[in-house]
Structures are given as C-alpha cells and as structure tokens.
Image (cartoon, helix red, strand yellow):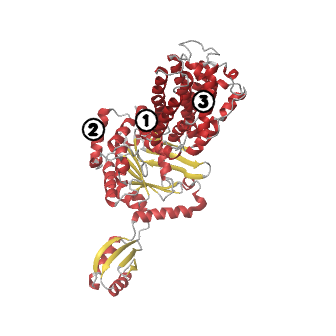
Amino acid sequence: MPLRAILQHDLRNLCESRIVRLWLAATALLTAAIVLTNWAETPSAPLVAMLLFPFLVFPWFLVVMLLGVNPTSGARAETLADGFLCRPVTRLECLLGTWVARLLAVGGVYLVVTAPAVAVVVLADRPPTDDGVTLYGIVAALGVVGLVLALQVSLGVLVGILLRRSLLAVAVLLLTWFPVNLVLHTFSLEQYSPITLSQRLPALLQQPWRAEPEADTATGEDMEALAQQAAQFLSVLSGAPPQPAKEPGFFDRAAIDDFSLRYVVLGYGIPTLLSIGLAAVCFHMRDF
Amino acid sequence: MRTSDVPPAIRTEHLTKIYRNRLIAVNDMSLLVPEGSVFGLLGPNGAGKTTTLRLIMGLQRPTAGRVAVQGMPCGPNAVAVRRLIGYLPTHPSFPGNLRPIEYLDLVGKLCRLSAQQRRPRIASLVRAVGLLGLTDQRIENLSTGETTRLGIAASLVGDPPLLIWDEPTAGLDPAARRFTLDLIRELGKSRTVVVATHILGDIDRICDHVGVMHAGRMVFSGPVQDMKRRLRPDDFCLELEGSGENVRRLAEQAGDLEGVGVRLSDQRTLAVAVRDGRPRAAVLAEVLQLVEPNRLALQSVHSGRNETEHAYLQLLQEDEAHGFQRFDIPSRRGDDAAAGDPSA
C-alpha cells in the first residue's frame, strides 16, 4: 500500500507541477510544427522518426533527466525523508514509488503528444507516397524511444542520489549524454547510441510484424531525408546555417548496418535496470 | 509480565554520530526512555537533539553504537519499529497542494491502514487538533500553528504507542503553545512521549523524565525531580509593595535572622538565601512575619530562580568545567546515572 500511495501522490504532484505542464505544451507545439512543416513533402517513416528525434537527442532529455534528479536531491530529499521515510515505509518502496511516478509522467507526456501525431501522420491521406509504415514498426519505435526515456529518468534518479545537488547532477548528465555517442563509437557500439537510433527509426517503422530486421530495409531516400531534417532541426534550434552534406564517417549507414532491435532493447533496458538497482543501493545507504 | 521484563521505550548504547569525520553531533550517548514516560530531551541549539531523534527514527545511520525501540533494533528499513513511532519534525514541511484530510489520508496509507481504519481515525483527529474549520484549505495556506497541529495529527494517524516530537512548540503563539503542551500532557497518560526542546518551561510543565544534552553528550538523564534535587538548596524571592526605605529596613531585619542571607535584587524584590540547613518553610515564615510591621504588602513569593532552569544551567556549567575529565566519565567515575547510562 505505501508504494501505491507514494506513486499516486508523486504522480499528482507531477501533473500539477509547472515544469511538466510547460513541457507538455512545448512538446505539443514542437510536434505540431514538425507535422505541419513536413505535411506535404516528407514520407511517413522519416516524419515519424523526426517526431521522436527531440525525445532521443535534444532537447527533451534535459527535462526528463531534471524530473528524475529532482526528488532525490537537494531540499526535496529532506522533505521526502520527513514526509515518507519517517513512516513505516521501506526506502525501496519510497524510491520505486517516485521512480515509477516519473516514468508514468514522462511516458504520459510522450505518448499523449506523439501517439496522436503519429496516428495522424500515418493514417491521413497526404501527398507523399505511402512508404509502408507498419503497426509493429510504430509500436516498436515508440517502445524503443520510451525505453530511452526510462533510461534517462533512471540515470537522473541515480545521479541525483549520488551527487545530492540538483544543478550539479543535471550538469553532469548533460555533459555525459552527448559525449556518450563518441564513447560508443570508440567501442564500435554505435547501435546503442541515441543518434544512431534516431537514424535507424525509419527502417524500424517499416519493419513487418515479428520479422528480423533487414540491414538495408531503410531506403536511401528515407535515410537522406531524415538526416537532412535532423540537420535542419538542429540548425533551427542553434540559429546556425544548415550543415552541408557530410562525407561518410561517424554515423554513416555502414555503422548502423548491424542494428538489431533485440540488442538495442537490451542495450537500453539493462542499463535502466542497473541504474535503478544502483540507485536503490545508494538510497538505502544514504543518511538524511 | 513483571515490570522489569518490559523493555524501555527507547534505549541507546554508546550512540555516536560523526558527520564526514568533521562534526561530532552525538558523542557516545547512552539513554534510556522509560515506557509510559513523558521524556524531555533538553539542550541548547546544536546540542545534537535532532540528530539523536533522527538516529532513533532510522533516518540516519549511527557512526557507532545502537538504538532499540521497545527492544527492536532501528535502521533505515525498520518498518516494524516505525509503526510504533509517531514522528513530528521541527518546522514540518508538508505537500502544500494537498488539503489536511488528503494529507492525513496519505499518511494513513503509508502507515498501511485500511480505508475502514483510516477514515474514522482521521475524522476524529481533525476534530481533536482543531482543524475542522480548515479542511477545505490547502496546506500551503495554513499558519505555522495550524501546520504544527496537522503534523501532530499526522503523527497520531497510526495510533503509535511512542511519540517523538522535535520542538513541537517552536514558532507557536502562546495559545497554540498551550494547546500543544496540554495535548502532550494528555497523550502522555496513555503513551510514551519524547519531546525535544530548548524551552525549559515546557519541560517543567509536561515532563516527568528529562535528558540534558550538551555538545552531543548526555550530561544528565533521569526524573525531573532528580535533576532539581541536584541543586544546592538556596533562595526564594519576595516581591513587595511599599517604600524603598521600608524594604531596605526589612532586608536588614531579615539579615539578622539565624541562617538567613538577604540581598535586594531591585528596589522591591528581596532575595532570601537559606543557610546552615535550616528548613526553608521556617525561614520563610519568619521573614513573612516582618513584612507587615514594616508597612509593606506582599505581592508574591517564588523560588529565587526557575528551578529547572537553574538545574539545567548548572548541569551545563558542570559539563564545561569537567574539561578533559569528560573523556569516558561514566566508567571512570561510576556515575552512570548522571551520564544517563541505561544500566543505572
């Protein structure tokens, strides 16, 4: 019962919080802008991948990690201790309650905005030719991105517990999330990189039910369109002119040919579980 | 079950808390809180009272030593122990977006009470702490006193046999303070209550046992009367009405009495010290007989200083004066009771 009580209480707090409401509004606006600007030109698979890009790479990971960091660091942690931990509640129940509440809040915002947008993009009669987006592909893509969000929340909780200071924890996460792509490249693990994942999403969206993904399922046009749209998106955010087409290199197609949904799920799922497990151990050891 | 078989409500043995090898908050503290007592944990700011309570709650881990509540060891996951405890932190901070009943319901769920148990209890608690007219207000709109009353109600939701309240009268106006003290006295009839405070008047009014902390150490633990008994028998004060000349004459006459020392605290207050083992009542009667002949009116008679305050300050002074002798005092002096050793 305490776990459910903490979960309900925290979820209610999150729903009433300004940061979540602003994030919901901003996500809805950005999604609408992406759909409207690409409505007549971009095929369904790259357009859906573009809708998911902000959750994978930038800017929403900041908000997600901030939500993860908040309850376990700073003054909030003291309140947590006085409010919950002085009652007959185990620390694991307390941590799991706040973690699951954050997962639900983040997942809720993500699905409330993206699921209808994806449905509209796929089902609407649009000028671009049908590029064969499957229901399985949509569910798998949404699920994988959801898993990345779960990892972000879990990392936020873990780093918040370890560092105790919200701002420091967010700064550390910020400095970790982008360079991790380079680290993965160094160890030839590009398929676990969020950027690679975002590039691979069009192929995943076109994948049929229970079929093993073909290395070259994505068409060259899809990949090119997504790469261009991603560059355009980043250039709009940064105010810089769009980058010219790059020579094949870090994130070229060859690097993602070995993309496997199963490995990617494990690649994000195991760190998520490890993060929350380690967070539980650290939370158990903690003095309030 | 014999009385000796009943475990103490709280027992700490050599409890020590050192923060990051820099600050000694609690220093080798042994404490015994008898079952059914109203125990005042007294000490100046920074003495280690709150840290001690948090160690008892299992919110912090002791660097050394151990804590047991009703014979059960405490720790971060000691759910069974915390079911026995109703905790009120200093300046409690509650979720401001909730209303009092919603918050108490949340606490009831955390205490693993079913809805059938929670609802009638919450209704009676809201009424008992006087929040009945504020149930539609958000907690963020409640005053300090109302928030404290809500915290008191929250600590009672699980109907625990042990209450640990950390400075429950801090920041309260006189009416709210009186309400809280009366409530503690009432609750103390059926439960063990531990109240941490630095307000001596509160201890005098509600506690039957007291522990005095100074710089992380327990310098005294025992019945309040024992603490007062440690005082030197000294003076009482007479507040008089009349001319200053007459008061001075009365002081001279009283000073001539056997075993009496007199001094004027101010123009209207006479401080009388009892000496040579004379009974205080006899000395008082003799001095009072001199009042009317000197054309003075008696306004009040009281102890020269607040006894508890005096005893408390004396304990702190003694502790300061011990200097290096404070190292391992109980084992060297065998003065276990004075140091609050539970084996005493």
Which residue type does callout 1 highlight?
Leu
The residue identified by callout 3 is A229
Q: Of the numbered discs in the image, which one, if any, rests on residue B120?
A: 2
Q: Can residue A91 be seen by looking at this rendering?
A: no
Query: Looking at the image, do the residues carrying marks 1 and 2 touch, with CB atoms under 8 Å apart?
Result: no
Q: Of the numbered discs in the image, which one, if any, rests on residue B124?
A: none
Chain bearing mark 3:
A
Residue B311: x %, y % from top left: 44, 63
Chain bearing mark 1:
A
- Say if B175 sits above or below A224 in the image: below
Marks 3 and 1: which is nearer the front?
Answer: 3
Query: Looking at the image, do the residues carrying marks 2 and 3 touch, with CB atoms under 8 Å apart?
Result: no
Q: Are marks 3 and 1 on the same chain?
A: yes
Chain bearing mark 2:
B
The residue identified by callout 1 is A11
Marks 1 and 2: which is nearer the front?
Answer: 1
Tell me the quarter of the picture where residue A199 sits.
top right
Which residue type does callout 3 highlight?
Gln
Q: Residue at x 45, y 62 (%)?
A: B312
Residue B174: x %, y % from top left: 33, 60
Q: Are marks 1 and 2 on the same chain?
A: no
Residue A229: x %, y % from top left: 60, 29
